[in-house]
Image (cartoon, rainbow, N blue to C red):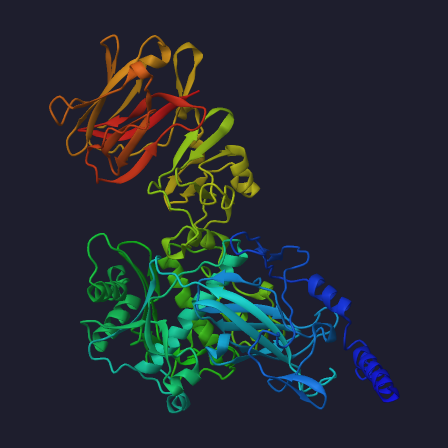
């Protein structure tokens, strides 16, 4: 018994000594309470929430949203349920050979800040941002190693700089139990310095299949050798053939996706992003997969050859640079034709395609890049973005090379490769230009115009900062790069870009409600300078352009304002005064243009706000009543076109009942005639087209009334459909497929007072008149 008593006393003393941290420098090891407080109070530039479907905006104009107690998951190096083997080394519990430390023993376990535990994501390569320790109290360097779920992907290592780290994590479908190991520098004052501090973290990955993909294409001339520009050392070390081009282009595309997905999250739009078409092939996202020939499901890169030779592409490119304006889109047209033939598009089908022009080469004599074009367009059936391969040698070809590629200060040797626009003076800057400028064109592909900041300006010269914690010397700025790259220092998509992405079909999530097929927008200037804007698919945002502005500098954002309609309200009210106040003083009294976008990706332009709200929009009715015209459909430019207007008799004679409506039409709308119960009628337009027209009778005995019209319109009015208060529809009279669709239904609190417009050989202008 005395022996066991003495042993127990020694054990207690040993336990107290171990927990006190006497062998460590003062302050090196925190208590359990200190560790918890640090985890909760450390400020984070990226806010993680409990659910990816209910997000908070973290960045707005480069500022950080204050937060309290972010949801962080801290764990010991292994959990009791893990498959790791536990043993003892010198009396210390170990897991996989590392000393096992409890959460109360150290504050140095990595903290994941950019995403919350058990979040759902929809991209294979996810960008992670986190911290080690408390950056405010002690700046720590070291290495972070990511161990993937059940060793499904080779582990990757990432630098820790100033207590901050960024990592790209490879995910497999389903639950991903990840381990993040922090290893301090070898000469560290942290107790037990050959120790790894670890955090377990779970992320769920659900691949998407119902959204259209972004296709990746490498385009070559019919006689191309399939090589790209590279310095001799690169050629010898990694090669510059088509196989390596595919690997580098695929990795660049996954960087686009990781960057965009994180940007969407920071703008409170969830973990949404475009997807790629994938196929079962030898994996290239890890260099170890490539060496071992391991098969994986990764983004497919289509190899497409044009009917043009490399020499013809070169000559066309030179003509595009120095020839007349008619040649400016020559390479773009060739790429589009080749892509259309490759995919075999049928009428009505659309395709989103990013093309890498492999036959772009640096002409040292002419000092120009031949076979290169930077262009993107979201029009037509092929939504296309093209860019040259002249920076391709600097791209990473796998995840392990991302940080080295964006840290490589090797100067660009213009004897072999181009220094694009003088902004690619070193390898890491060339990677920025090549990957980032191509992403800029992908932005055009998704419908983004140029912006006043962000990727759609030239913010991609900072693209490296998204994936690294430190920036090297820049030949572009002739200055030392940032010692610590925080999320606030990174490049970004402009808010207007992510608003467009939010409603784009390539960015849809399974949880998104169905998008209404009707995307049109109607503008109703009413009393007291108010402007009512209605859209069945919701009003997403308004761009406000002052006189002389060619890019948008001011806008109103309605996204996430209405949870019942895909996040956007069906009706909003603005005033001319508040729209003008958005602009600088010197522009407020001048002409203002509005671009209004709906949740269905419809767009309506108001060329002059002053004309919209002028007295011309008001219509005098009987007994002092006032009516208001909505924005007109059609162009009113047919030869001999004359203004036409009808105020319904039932508005100023309540005893009259509108009993039927007759539509005169052929391949377009010729006229509309309104019939009343006293055998009178009113004609808008002409009695042309089909003899006698088509009549739609209202059920007046049951109180059915006219609610509005569905109109097909373009240059003129192609067709029209009558809508009633009982939900009945007449069907479209006229050309049911001409022009585009527009729903004319008065906003809440208003009713139809008449119709206004113009008529030449047929009706070429139409608007609704409403009143209280």
Q: Quadrant of residue 108?
A: bottom right
Q: In the visual, does 483 lie left or right of 640?
A: right
Horizontal side of 726 relative to 122 (left or right) equals: left
- Up/down of 206 relative to 145, above or below: above
Residue found at the far right of this picture: 2
Q: Position of residue 544 (x, y in %)?
A: 47, 43
Residue 281: give x, y in percent of width and height: 33, 77
**What quarter of the picture does the C terminus occupy?**
top left
Give the image quarter of residue 340.
bottom left
Which quadrant does the N terminus fall into? bottom right
- Frontmost residue, 736 versus 97: 97
For residue 278, above or below residue 57: below
Query: At 15% across and 24% down in the image, what residue appears?
Result: 693
Q: Residue extending furthest front?
A: 1
Count of numbered circles in the view: 0
Judge by depth and name the residue closer to the eye, 372 or 722: 722
Q: Position of residue 304 (x, y in %)?
A: 24, 72
* Residue 61 seen from this side: no
Residue found 46% across the figure and 60% down from its top:
457
- In percent of width and height, residue 408 lies at 51, 82
Query: What residue is at 43 percent from the left and 15 percent from the top?
Result: 625
In the picture provided, is 478 more to the left or to the right than 9? Answer: left
Q: Nearer the viewer, residue 683 or 637?
A: 683
Asked whether the viewer can see residue 147, the reply is yes
């Amino acid at each position: 018994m005395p022996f066991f008593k003495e042993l127990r006393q020694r054990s207690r003393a040993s336990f107290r000594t171990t927990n006190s941290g006497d062998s460590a420098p003062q302050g090196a090891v925190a208590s359990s309470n200190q560790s918890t407080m640090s985890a909760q109070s450390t400020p984070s530039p990226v806010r993680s929430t409990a659910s990816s479907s209910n997000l908070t905006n973290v960045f707005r104009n480069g500022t950080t949203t204050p937060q309290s107690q972010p949801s962080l998951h801290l764990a010991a190096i292994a959990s009791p349920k893990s498959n790791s083997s536990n043993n003892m080394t010198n009396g210390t519990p170990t897991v996989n050979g590392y000393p096992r430390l409890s959460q109360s023993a150290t504050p140095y376990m990595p903290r994941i800040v950019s995403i919350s535990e058990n979040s759902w994501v929809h991209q294979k390569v996810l960008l992670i941002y986190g911290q080690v320790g408390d950056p405010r109290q002690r700046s720590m360097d070291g290495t972070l190693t990511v161990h993937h779920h059940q060793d499904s992907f080779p582990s990757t290592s990432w630098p820790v700089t100033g207590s901050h780290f960024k990592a790209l994590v490879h995910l497999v479908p389903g639950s991903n139990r990840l381990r993040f190991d922090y290893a301090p520098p070898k000469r560290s004052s942290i107790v037990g310095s050959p120790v790894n501090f670890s955090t377990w973290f779970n992320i769920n990955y659900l691949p998407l299949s119902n959204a259209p993909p972004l296709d990746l294409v490498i385009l070559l001339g019919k006689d191309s050798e399939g090589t790209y520009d590279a310095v001799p050392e690169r050629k010898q070390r990694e090669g510059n053939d088509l196989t390596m081009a595919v690997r580098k282009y695929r990795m660049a595309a996954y960087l686009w996706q990781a960057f965009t997905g994180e940007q969407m999250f920071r703008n409170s739009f969830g973990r949404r992003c475009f997807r790629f078409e994938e196929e079962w092939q030898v994996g290239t996202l890890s260099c170890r997969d490539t060496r071992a020939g391991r098969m994986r499901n990764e983004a497919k890169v289509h190899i497409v050859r044009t009917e043009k030779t490399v020499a013809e592409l070169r000559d066309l490119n030179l003509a595009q640079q120095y020839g007349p304006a008619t040649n400016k889109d020559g390479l773009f047209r060739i790429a589009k034709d080749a892509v259309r033939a490759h995919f075999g598009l049928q009428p009505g089908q659309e395709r989103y395609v990013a093309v890498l022009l492999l036959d772009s080469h640096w002409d040292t004599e002419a000092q120009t890049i031949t076979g290169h074009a930077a262009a993107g367009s979201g029009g037509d059936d092929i939504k296309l973005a093209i860019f040259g391969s002249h920076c391709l040698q600097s791209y990473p070809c796998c995840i392990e090379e991302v940080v080295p590629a964006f840290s490589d200060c090797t100067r660009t040797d213009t004897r072999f490769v181009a220094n694009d626009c003088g902004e690619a003076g070193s390898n890491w800057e060339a990677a920025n230009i090549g990957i980032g400028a191509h992403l800029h064109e992908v932005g055009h592909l998704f419908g983004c115009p140029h912006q006043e900041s962000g990727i759609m300006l030239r913010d991609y010269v900072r693209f490296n900062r998204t994936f690294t914690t430190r920036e090297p010397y820049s030949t572009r700025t002739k200055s030392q790069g940032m010692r610590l790259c925080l999320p606030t220092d990174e490049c970004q998509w402009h808010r207007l870009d992510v608003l467009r992405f939010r409603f784009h079909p390539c960015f849809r999530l399974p949880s998104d409600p169905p998008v209404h097929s009707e995307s049109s927008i109607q503008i109703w200037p009413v009393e007291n300078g108010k402007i009512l804007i209605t859209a069945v698919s919701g009003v997403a945002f308004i761009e406000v352009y002052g006189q002389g502005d060619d890019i948008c500098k001011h806008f109103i954002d309605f996204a996430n304002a209405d949870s019942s309609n895909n996040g956007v309200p069906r009706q909003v009210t603005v005033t001319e005064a508040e729209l003008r106040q958005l602009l600088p003083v010197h522009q407020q009294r001048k002409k203002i243009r509005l671009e209004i976008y709906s949740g269905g990706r419809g767009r309506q332009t108001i060329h002059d706000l002053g004309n919209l709200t002028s007295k011309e929009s008001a219509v005098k009715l009987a007994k002092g009543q006032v009516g208001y015209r909505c924005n007109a459909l059609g162009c009113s430019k047919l030869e001999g076109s004359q203004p036409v207007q009808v105020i319904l008799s039932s508005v100023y004679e309540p005893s009259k009942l509108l009993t039927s409506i007759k539509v005169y039409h052929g391949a377009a709308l010729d006229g509309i005639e309104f019939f009343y119960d006293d055998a009178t009628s009113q004609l808008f337009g002409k009695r042309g087209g089909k003899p006698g027209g088509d009549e739609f009778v209202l059920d007046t005995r049951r109180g059915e009334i006219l609610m509005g019209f569905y109109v097909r319109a373009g240059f003129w009015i192609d067709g029209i459909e009558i809508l009633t208060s009982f939900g009945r529809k007449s069907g479209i009279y006229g050309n049911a497929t001409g022009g585009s669709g527009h729903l004319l239904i008065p906003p809440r609190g208003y009713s139809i007072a008449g119709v206004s417009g113009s008529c030449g050989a047929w009706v070429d202008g139409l608007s609704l008149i409403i009143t209280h």
